[in-house]
């Protein structure tokens, strides 16, 4: 559900050029186009794994988004070989969460690269985003809450000023710590930070999705500009 949360957290204006770094099967871009197609001039999915890039290509065609969405295979550590600096108004990313040797291990190499920082580090991701986003453009990410300090430090180092943070919790009762954070930063942004209300995935432990989470999966929930 991480890409679902990320896609709905993204704010868009008009005529946006959007880059999805480490797009996987393209889910974030597909949701953005389904919800906010009118606000996007082009959405570029960037993925290092050939198999996932091929799946993204199929998903683009199956959903009829060929005129608005493209897939480019490549290594984000060499991002300057693929895009001119500051080519995008918004960059989104659901980066690999775990450093090698940590988190749930997978025997599937494709899943291992997607979940673990094998082909790139978080620093590589932030660097690529900073290079490709335009001045005053947005960089939006989802990341484990326990890695927030590292994420904020890397964003600051690349002059990406954090403007919105929303903590995601499993459920409100019984209370528990946040599991994820959604973070929006602006390149060379000024002061001011909106710490948003908590987002709960379930209504209670062992319960159903919260009303807020159900809304994200509702095909009839169509969004305009800012979400």
Image (cartoon, helix red, strand yellow):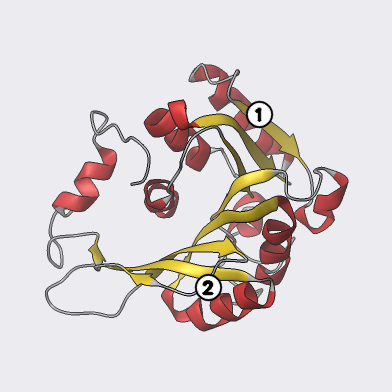
Mark 1 → mark 2, Cα distance in angstroms: 31 Å
Residue sitting farthest toward the front: 190
Residue 6 lies, in percent from the top left, at 43, 52
Q: Nearer the viewer, residue 135 or 139?
A: 135
Q: Is residue 2 above or below residue 194?
A: above
Q: Nearer the viewer, residue 47 or 69?
A: 69
Residue 60 lies, in percent from the top left, at 56, 24
Residue 226 lies, in percent from the top left, at 36, 45
| Residue at 17 percent of width and 79 percent of height | 175
As helix, strand or loop, the secondary structure at mark 2 comes to loop
Q: Nearer the viewer, residue 148 or 105?
A: 148
Q: Is residue 92 visible?
A: yes
| Residue at 22 percent of width and 63 percent of height | 200
The quadrant in which residue 42 appears is: top right
Query: What residue sits right under mark 2 in the picture?
Result: 103
Query: What residue sits right under mark 1 in the picture?
Result: 70
Q: Is residue 213 above or below residue 95?
A: above
């Amino acid at each position: 559900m991480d890409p679902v949360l990320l896609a709905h957290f993204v704010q868009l204006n008009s005529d946006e050029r959007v880059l999805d770094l480490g797009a996987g099967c393209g889910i974030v871009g597909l949701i953005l186009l389904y919800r906010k197609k009118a606000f996007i001039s082009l959405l570029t999915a960037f993925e290092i794994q050939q198999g996932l890039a091929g799946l993204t290509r199929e998903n683009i065609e199956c959903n009829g988004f060929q005129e608005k969405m493209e897939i480019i295979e490549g290594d984000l550590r060499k991002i300057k070989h693929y895009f001119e600096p500051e080519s995008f108004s918004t960059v989104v990313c659901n980066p690999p969460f775990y450093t090698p040797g940590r988190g749930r291990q997978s025997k599937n190499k494709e899943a291992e690269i997607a979940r673990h920082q094998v082909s790139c580090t978080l620093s590589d991701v932030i660097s690529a985003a900073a290079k490709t986003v335009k001045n005053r453009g947005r960089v939006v990410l989802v990341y484990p809450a326990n890695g927030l300090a590292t994420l904020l430090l890397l964003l600051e180092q690349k002059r990406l000023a954090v403007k919105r943070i929303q903590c995601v919790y499993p459920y409100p009762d019984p209370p528990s710590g946040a599991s994820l954070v959604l973070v929006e930063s602006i390149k060379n942004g000024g002061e001011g930070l909106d710490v948003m209300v908590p987002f709960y995935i379930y209504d209670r432990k062992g319960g159903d999705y919260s009303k807020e989470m159900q809304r994200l999966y509702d095909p009839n929930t169509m969004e305009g500009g800012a979400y």
